[in-house]
Image (cartoon, grey):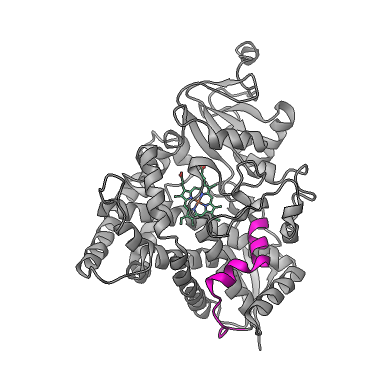
């Protein structure tokens, strides 16, 4: 009754709850997507729920995505929503720990390390790292592996090598990987909800950061000694970058930015690659078509390890692999809650609602991406649905600067796995090149099938990035000439 009496019709409807303060946290936490769909049906695309004292206004479907991604920065910010979560992981002075105008400049600096010239150099490194990993760990002709674990290691090695550079990559197993894990352990919903709690993981992450700062500083100092020597990686790009006012990014901020990039891409790309392979394991016809396209494009059989390296153009043009990644991201977007904090009351366009300051707003683009009104068989994994997207009124296939990740260029597309607006992902093209190259290499060398006992894993919503529920058992079989 109290909730009904306090209802303000100029604000979005509030999901009723039994326990004050806790609100709908448990129902939301168990399955956020089911929760959002249930109340979207009841209240429409804008509604508020209480979660541990925070008022979260969910904004879904195309209008909801558009509102969250393009709302005025003077009223609603990402930094007020995220910085307490990301600062212990990324460190100070980067991403959400700086004014938004500075983040925009930092994103421009990162672009220099994501040029086509760099991608050309990254592809052979991706292939070498994947081959080294499977040669070391998948030694039998066939076997069962924890696919998420294997892919996560391939992602960390390929990303460290190309973003942080070979020096730090070579230290990965001399403790650097453990330092990343320590930082990563602060990246959980608990840390988001209990930002005021002095959790022990914060102290551990401070120590890990200090150690990583020391390692980065020595690598940067060594590179500065050999000034004419060019490395094609993100570290070099950031070391050479300057703000508009001519100031360089300090060495500490170069290190922190690299950690931020590595962390932003780690679980997102590992989850996407793993889901793609799990779905391929269930769909041998898609595997055959993809291999056929790979072989036609390369002009030879692609079996085993000693296969020709694809160029950047080949990887870009392999449309079957593109469709696989795109479709996987549509139904298994790893980020399902994108948040902002309202700092000044803000009206939702084309509604009578005003969201008060202090509320959080939350976009969940996976809701429209898996809505039957936009995609037939919306929950099914059908990569070929992207073959003729030009004909589909709902999909947008405009190309980006690099020609990758074409689905997310229109803010009004129902599929936005990389977000939109000023905070749109900067790593999309890198992720596409990395994931497609890993799939190219693995599909040439192995056949995959689901573990008969485990089958297709469910989604695990207990982390900030939605992962397949472990252990993600999958069978591999070496392909022979
Ligand atoms: C932001 C998704 C890979 C760097 C984002 C956002 C999404 C996203 C949805 C927007 C967050 C928001 O609006 O609140 C993904 C997915 C990936 C991926 C699905 C892989 C499949 C990467 C990689 C990098 C990266 C590889 C770095 C190389 C970033 C950064 C931001 C971001 C720095 C923050 C941008 C900002 O707030 O302005 N990503 N990402 N991401 N991503 Fe990615």
Residue 380 spot, x, y in % from top left: 75, 54
Residue 46 spot, x, y in % from top left: 64, 28
* Res. 340 in view: yes
Q: Given the current orientation, which residue lies at the most extreme bottom position? A: 481
Residue 183 spot, x, y in % from top left: 39, 52
Picture quadrant of residue 217: bottom left
- Give, as a single range, the part of the protein colored magenta: 304-327
388 magenta-colored? no
Q: Quadrant of the C terminus?
A: bottom right
Residue situated in front as seen by the camera: 60 or 99: 99
Count the numbered circles shown: 0
- The answer to whether residue 359 is left or right of residue 387 is left
Residue situated in front as seen by the camera: 436 or 71: 71
Q: Given the current orientation, which residue lies at the most extreme right position? A: 376
320 magenta-colored? yes
Name the chief secondary structure element in magenta. Answer: helix
Q: Quadrant of the N terminus?
A: top right
Picture quadrant of residue 293: bottom right
């Amino acid at each position: 009754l109290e909730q009904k009496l306090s209802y303000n019709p100029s604000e979005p409807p509030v999901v009723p709850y039994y326990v004050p303060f806790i609100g709908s946290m448990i129902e939301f936490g168990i399955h956020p997507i089911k929760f959002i769909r249930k109340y979207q049906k009841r209240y429409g695309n804008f509604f508020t729920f209480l979660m541990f004292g925070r008022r979260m206004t969910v904004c879904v479907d195309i209008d909801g995505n558009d509102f969250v991604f393009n709302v005025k920065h003077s009223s609603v910010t990402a930094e007020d929503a995220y910085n307490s979560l990301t600062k212990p992981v990324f460190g100070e002075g980067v991403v959400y720990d700086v004014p938004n105008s500075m983040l925009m400049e930092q994103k421009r600096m990162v672009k220099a390390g994501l040029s086509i010239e760099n991608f050309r150099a990254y592809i052979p490194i991706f292939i070498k790292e994947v081959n080294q990993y499977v040669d070391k760990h998948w030694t039998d002709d066939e076997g069962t592996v924890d696919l998420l674990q294997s892919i996560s290691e391939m992602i960390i090695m390929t990303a460290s090598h190309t973003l942080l550079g070979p020096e730090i990559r070579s230290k990965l197993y001399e403790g650097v990987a453990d330092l990343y894990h320590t930082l990563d352990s602060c990246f959980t919903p608990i840390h988001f909800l209990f930002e005021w709690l002095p959790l022990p993981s914060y102290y551990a992450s401070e120590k890990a950061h200090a150690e990583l700062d020391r390692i980065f500083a020595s690598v940067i100092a060594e590179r500065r000694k050999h000034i004419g020597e060019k490395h094609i990686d993100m570290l070099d790009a950031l070391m050479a970058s300057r703000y508009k006012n001519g100031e360089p990014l300090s060495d500490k901020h170069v290190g922190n930015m690299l950690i931020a990039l590595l962390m932003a891409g780690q679980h997102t790309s590992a989850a996407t690659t793993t889901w793609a392979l799990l779905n391929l394991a269930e769909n041998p016809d898609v595997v055959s078509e993809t291999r056929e396209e790979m072989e036609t494009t390369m002009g030879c059989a692609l079996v085993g390890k000693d296969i020709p390296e694809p160029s950047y153009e080949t990887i870009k043009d392999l449309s079957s692999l593109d469709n696989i990644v795109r479709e996987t991201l549509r139904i298994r977007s790893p980020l399902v809650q994108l948040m902002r904090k309202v700092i000044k009351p803000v009206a939702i366009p084309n509604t009578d609602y005003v969201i008060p300051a202090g509320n959080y707003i939350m976009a969940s683009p996976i809701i429209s991406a898996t809505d039957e009104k936009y995609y037939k068989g919306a929950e099914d994994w059908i990569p070929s649905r992207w073959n003729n997207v030009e004909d589909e009124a709902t999909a947008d296939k405009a190309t980006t600067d690099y020609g990758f990740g074409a689905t997310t260029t229109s803010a009004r597309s129902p599929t936005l796995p990389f977000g939109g607006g000023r905070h749109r992902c900067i790593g999309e093209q890198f992720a596409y090149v990395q994931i497609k190259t890993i799939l190219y290499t693995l599909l040439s060398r192995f056949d995959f099938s689901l573990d008969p006992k485990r089958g297709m894993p469910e989604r695990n919503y207990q982390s900030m990035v939605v992962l397949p529920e472990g252990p993600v058992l999958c069978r591999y079989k070496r392909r022979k000439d």
